[in-house]
Amino acid sequence: MAVAPDSPESTEIPELPEKLRAPGPVIVAGMVAWLVATIVVAVTGAGSDRALTVCLVGLGVGVLGIVIVTVQRGAVRRGAKGAQVGLD
């Protein structure tokens, strides 16, 4: 079954702007939120030791995210076959 040129199925979806595709600001915002939570838990003693552990793990996940994005951007610059697309 052929698709007519004016049909909705043939419409190209525009690419998102760079500001909406960039993972860095999202990761940094998450790390700032975890940092604030860590400070609040450490200063007030709210919760238990488990709460502080969860906050520190949240910060660790943010650091891991930054490392992964940095490594992938390096792979894109090198032209590696397995690199993610769109991280220029």
Image (spheres, grey):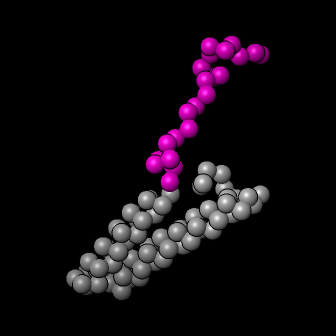
Q: Which residues are magenta?
A: 1-22
Furthest-left residue in this view? 44
* Residue shown at the point (50%, 57%) measured from the top left: 23
Is residue 82 at least partly visible in the picture? no
**Above/below status of 55 relative to 45:** above
Q: Main secondary structure of the magenta part?
A: loop
Please indicate whether residue 57 sits to the left or right of residue 83 in the image: left
The image shows residue 38 at horizontal and vertical percentages of: 33, 78
Q: Name the spot of residue 7 as percent of width and height, x first.
A: 62, 16
> Does 64 appear above or below 12?
below
Question: Which one is in front, 62 or 70?
Answer: 70
**Snapshot quadrant of residue 54:** bottom left
Query: Left or right: where does residue 73 sit relative to residue 40?
Result: right
**Total numbered circles:** 0
Q: Quadrant of residue 76?
A: bottom right
The image shows residue 40 at horizontal and vertical percentages of: 26, 77
Residue at 22% of width from left, 82% of height from top? Answer: 44
Residue 11: image location, x then y, percent: 61, 23
